[in-house]
Amino acid sequence: MSGALLRTTGLTAAYGDAQALFGIDFELRAGETVAIIGANGAGKSTFLKALTGLVKVPVAMVSFDGVPIGGAAPGAIVRQGLAMVPEGRRLFPSLTVEENLLMGANARRPGPWTLERLFGLFPILKDKRANPGMALSGGQQQMVAIGRALMSNPRVLLCDELSLGLAPIVVAEIYRVLHTLTAEGMSVVIVEQDVSTACRVSQRVYCFQEGRVSLQGASHELTREQISLAYFGV
Amino acid sequence: MSEIQVERVTRLSRAAAVVGVLLVGVAITLPAWGESSTMRDFVELACYFVFAMMWNLLAGYGGMVSIGQQAFFGLGGYGMLVLADHAGVNPFVAIVLAALATAALAWPLSRLAFRLQGGYFAIGTWVIAEVLRLSVANVSVVGGGSGTSLTALAGLGKGVRESVTYWMALGCVVATLVGVYLFLRSKQGLALMAIRDNETASESQGIAVGRMKLAVYIVAAGGAALAGGLYFVSTLRISPDAAFSVNWTAFAIFMVVIGGIGRIEGPIVGTLVFFFLNKAFSGYGTWYLMGLGLLAIVVTLFFKQGLWGWIQQRHGWVLFPTQRRLRL
Amino acid sequence: MIAWLDVLIQGVLLGGLYGLFALGLSLMFGVMRLTNVAHGDIVVLAAFAAIAGVSALGGTAGSLWPLLGVSLLLLPLAFGAGYLLQRQVLNGTLGRDPLPSMVVTFGLSIVVQNALLQAFSADPRALDVGELAIHSLPLPGGLALGTLPLITFVISLAATAGLQALFGRTALGRSFRAVSDDREVAELMGLDARKVYALATALAFVLVALAGVLQAMRTTVSPGDGPLLLLFAFEAVIIGGMGSFWGTLVGALLLGVTQQIGFQFDPGWGIWFGHLVFLAVLVVRPQGLFPKTRG
């Protein structure tokens, strides 16, 4: 009960007439890294959208540090300290790298992250700061997307499919950076297709299947068999 | 597992079909007992209706919103005039020929128009219509800017002329209704609705999106031209400003939006509403037009589905069923 | 030779005014993919508002002070009107389907035209600018630069530069670009898209008001002039290439020159010639002359 930084209680959500989530109970404690795995269409991205206000849900179903934030405006949620790195990066094509990062500071909270500090974390972006965001490689775009989220000085980072479309060596680098952040106390939720990466970098795992939580537990305790069953729901 | 049936027809639509056939039967006899003004009204209504149906086909089903359909209306009118007065063709035959010729002309014109998308496509079609208007206004053979009269029907008695025009109008209405309905029920029609809903997905399913859109554009052009030729056979006088006026499209938009875009019943309802509004209030000039404009705005903002769409949502009535339902 | 130079100069100066017409249209389309069919009618509305304002203030014929006062008042009014229109009416029409915004602005166009007809009748009106209408700066070779067209051209240049700078170098400009790129992610960044859209329209209306006043100073205006001005604005945007304000201005200049050339052959041909050149550009280079490549 106590200590949960981010919590959902019986979270339901729908896209128009189509029900996508059927009562998700979820918890993230301060300093934790929690992974969400599941097949495509299981509701993982919808869940993140419900957390960030892009999909409207009843107000009591999501709480952040004890404050109910369900259905609030995305900007207000960011100002509370919850920032998202969207699936597919989704940088702004008309903006340069630097401008993309500055956009993240639009709803910033007080905190240590500045452009200079970000360039310290991602040195390569400093050289490319004036380039259009989309002219970068996939891995570099992912860095910009993470940086953009960091610029608001969040307490919780939501990362949707960080490894999507990236080569393994690049993925490793991205997760190395993430590890630096969590070592400094950042709480993180990652949605991840790659189950072994998900279990490796997180302390706890939730498995989604058709809009419900089919399995949850400590990452190092769950067996492959358990995960397989929960993932495919056979 | 029991057999799954696909059904389309509803009881209401069957009843409507019977009523429709009866109405047409009665309508055919109108010249024998009806007044001249009634027949002329009907012809005007028919022109509005056909033009609106074509605009609806283009926008509601083809997903192409155009503010330039009057280009084809005018081409139909002038094409008919040229064939009738200068080539000695029977004016009523000329209507159809002009419509076909316009449809053919729509193909190269589409190469221009399709360079643009969305809102800019709409205005681009308007520019094309304007170019035609200005060009025709410079052609003295057809009367230049002040227009000219249709002389080919001079020998015909008024009664005969009005009756034949009326029957032709009736034929056009029935042909348009039946033609559009059959088309939308067909495989091509299904493809069209798929494109309307999601173009990229349709393409990935093997539907030739480009060809379908071109086909719809050409058919809509031909239909608009049919309405144009018919209109000027009825009024006997044509001018570039009347033929290529953007008001035609404005009225079509109004009729379709009020009635309900994307449904066949919609333009019927919209045309009737518009016609009666016109009869009742057009004497009020600018106030009437302002009212029309406001009505279109209000309906678009608050009754997105139009009058018929609203009725359909509340009562589920369908007169022209194109949806297929599964009966399990 | 000199005669053609004169045509070129007249065309460029005319194009300056067309550029002002086009900037607002380009802005609204760029930020929210909204095609305002009533665009030209709003220009005419602004012109009539200025005319009514000046005649209400009285003042000596040809005196420019009432005009200046009215114009300055008109700009913030236009800003507010644009903001409200977008916020309360047009925001509800945005989305994947271009039809609702088009029908609503089309309806608006009809309402504005007929309201003006009702209020002012169909007679063409103009703003009396006295001396300024004929004042010109002499050039070598017997040519002359009309002072009013020159002022208009300079204003247009300044507006284009200002808009380009706003977009490229300010936080508001960043908001415009972000919201136009990806509304959802922009909202994640804390932007209120509805407000950003409203600001864009407000700004567009200021440009439109400016254009309307200058148009009424240059020539007569009638309630039905709107659609043609819309077409000019549209043609300028397409010829110049979408996504670039400087491109729009160049497109407008080209349109102006084209029309002037057409006028030389026959008074009735200027506009027609402009239409033809637009269609030619559409055939040969549909992306326009200076399209901004998106990443």
Image (cartoon, coloured by chain):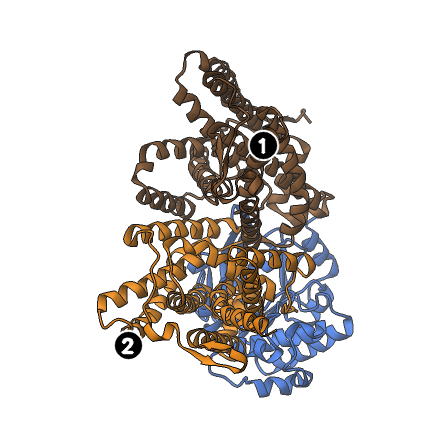
Chain colours: A blue, B brown, C orange
Q: Is residue C112 above or below residue A151?
A: above
Q: Amino acid at mark 2?
A: Trp
Indicate left or right for A197 with C123 as reference.
Answer: right
How far separated are the C-alphas under marks 2 and 1? Answer: 57 Å
Is residue C260 in view? yes
Q: Is residue B87 above or below residue B196?
A: above
* Residue displayed at 45% across by 60% down: A71
Per the rendering, the mark at residue A173 is none
Classify mark 1: residues with Cα within 10 Å, few (<14), some (14-19) or many (20+). Answer: many
Q: Residue B207 at x, y = what percent? A: 71, 42
* Residue displayed at 47% across by 26% down: B43
* Residue displayed at 30% across by 64% down: C51
Q: Residue B242 at x, y = what percent? A: 47, 40
User: Tag 1's secondary structure?
Assistant: helix
Q: Residue A200 at x, y = what percent? A: 70, 71
Per the rendering, the mark at residue C65 is 2
Can marks 2 and 1 be said to lie on one chain? no
* Residue displayed at 63% across by 39% down: B216
Q: Provide the residue designation for mark 1.
A: B80
